[in-house]
Image (cartoon, helix red, strand yellow):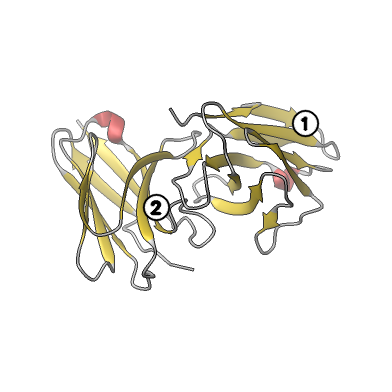
Amino acid sequence: LAKTTQPISMDSYEGQEVNITCSHNNIATNDYITWYQQFPSQGPRFIIQGYKTKVTNEVASLFIPADRKSSTLSLPRVSLSDTAVYYCLVGDHSGAGKSTFGDGTTLTVKP
Amino acid sequence: GAVVSQHPSRVICKSGTSVKIECRSLDFQATTMFWYRQFPKQSLMLMATSNEGSKATYEQGVEKDKFLINHASLTLSTLTVTSAHPEDSSFYICSASPGLQETQYFGPGTRLLVL
């Protein structure tokens, strides 16, 4: 199983850009990298998925270096409502089966 | 699009009773559904993977006779916690995927409290 390592927690202030890095040293050739956001007592919400280089959507960017042993989720100009737990998963498109949820990163956005 | 619902959202039951939780994909057909359990301040733990029309695949340490999973149609999977005990109290979350190689979408979760 592909194991991921993330910082346990991060603090930021409203309006700042936040970058959360995930290490996945034993990522397999066919593995994708998927990030989810979870609020308390809710199911995770899909944020972004990528395989290599850079992916951008309306809420975030995902940067993946050439060796793919890590990835960085970038949240531009965070707000208080971005306070949540962010999980990085490595595996097939579905993000399950071949990978497990790590401990996640608790992001706290302060006013 | 890609909405997954769960019912009930919260359930309280007495020890020894069975509880059924439904997971539905509302706007797509889900070939594969996943069931997770999450204890307070912990990460999600995958319990089992279910494919429509076949038996579920359980993760190591998950009792298949205690957590019965049925995936009878492409839009519905059910998890039945049989003879529930207080230690089964947890947050149960399902997810659905149009195919095993596609992104999974999560339901809102079901909070189970066993007294």
Disc 1, disc 2: CB below 8 Å? no
Q: Is residue A79 left or right of residue A46?
A: left
Number of the label disc, if any, that sits on residue B13: 1
Q: Is residue B40 left or right of residue B23?
A: left
Q: Quadrant of the C terminus of chain B?
A: top right
Q: From where the camera sits, is residue B46 visible?
A: yes
Q: Is residue A60 left or right of residue B46?
A: left
Residue A99 vs A85, above or below: the answer is: below
**Inter-mark Cα distance, 1 to 2:** 31 Å
The residue that appears at 84% across and 36% down in the rendered structure is: B17
Identify the chain of the residue marked 1, using the numbered disc in the image.
B
Number of the label disc, if any, that sits on residue A10: none
Counting labels gives 2
Quadrant housing residue B74 = top right
The residue that appears at 42% across and 35% down in the rendered structure is: A39
Percent x, y of residue B13: 77, 31
Residue A36 vs A26, above or below: the answer is: above
Give, as a three-letter code, the residue at label 2. Answer: Gly
Percent x, y of residue A46: 39, 40
Q: Quadrant of the N terminus of chain B?
A: top left
Crowd tier of the residue under label 1, counting other residues whose Cα lies within 10 Å: few below 14, some 14–19, many 20 or above: some
Residue for badge 2: A104
Give, as a three-letter code, the residue at label 1. Answer: Cys
The residue that appears at 49% across and 68% down in the rendered structure is: A1
Q: From where the camera sits, is residue B115 visible?
A: no
Q: Is residue A82 left or right of residue B45?
A: left
Residue B21 vs A86, above or below: the answer is: above
Q: Which of the pair A58/B51 is nearer the observer?
A: B51
Identify the chain of the residue marked 2, using the numbered disc in the image.
A
**Label 1 residue SS:** strand
